[in-house]
Amino acid sequence: MQKQRISYIRRRFFGKGGFAKCYELEKVGSGVIYAGKIVSKTLLMKENQKEKMAQEIHIHRSLEHRNIVKFYTYFEDTHNVYVLLELCRRRSMMELHKRRKALTEPEVRYFMKQLLEGVSYLHDLKIIHRDLKLGNLFLNDHLEVKIGDFGLAAKIEYSGQRKK
């Protein structure tokens, strides 16, 4: 049986981080739009960088919670690794901060409750994020907080374990 080839159209550029560039990707024929994290394989030359990418994918794909950016799938071609994630159209809390400068106390309560529910879920699974910041907290159309970017995340094997 032959695999069906799925194509994506690269749309709007969102930004870039240490390793990845993020774009809006549209699945051809369906109109479904994802956030696509694209990592050049030239940046994954060293074995430890490949392991970090594999670790990020392994951890993120195992998560399912309303306050975690949904992981759909990943694939690669000769040049890049592609990670398809939930599109958070309202961007990040960093963009919200730049636009608004300040939040009201009820807004802070609303966002913090969701953030803490997401972090509690991660900790129940013995996963530590290690890079929680405004730029890694995303907002969907309903202004729900979604924790994203698991590039520095780690799984703790035993209580009290330290990670470098």
Image (tube, rainbow, N blue to C red):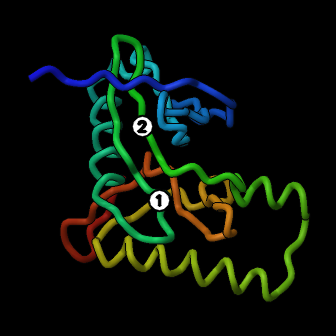
> Residue 162 appears at what percent x and percent y?
31, 64
> Residue 154 appears at what percent x and percent y?
33, 56
Question: Label 2 sits on what residue type?
Answer: Val
- Tell me what residue is drawn at x 61 percent, y 60 percent: 137
Q: Tag count in the figure?
A: 2
- Tell me what residue is drawn at x 44 percent, y 56 percent: 70
- Tell me what residue is drawn at x 34 percent, y 11 percent: 78
Depth check: give the residue in front, 162 or 117. Answer: 117
**Mark 2 = which residue?**
83
**Mark 1 = which residue?**
130
| Disc 1 secondary structure class | loop
Which residue, as the protein is rendered here, is positioned at the far left? 1
Q: Is residue 16 above or below residue 157?
A: above
| Rendered-image quadrant of the N terminus | top left
Which residue, as the protein is rendered here, is positioned at the far top? 78
> Residue 143 appears at what percent x and percent y?
69, 69
Mark 2 vs 1: CB contact within 8 A: no
Quadrant housing residue 26: top right
Disc 2 to disc 1, C-alpha distance:
20 Å
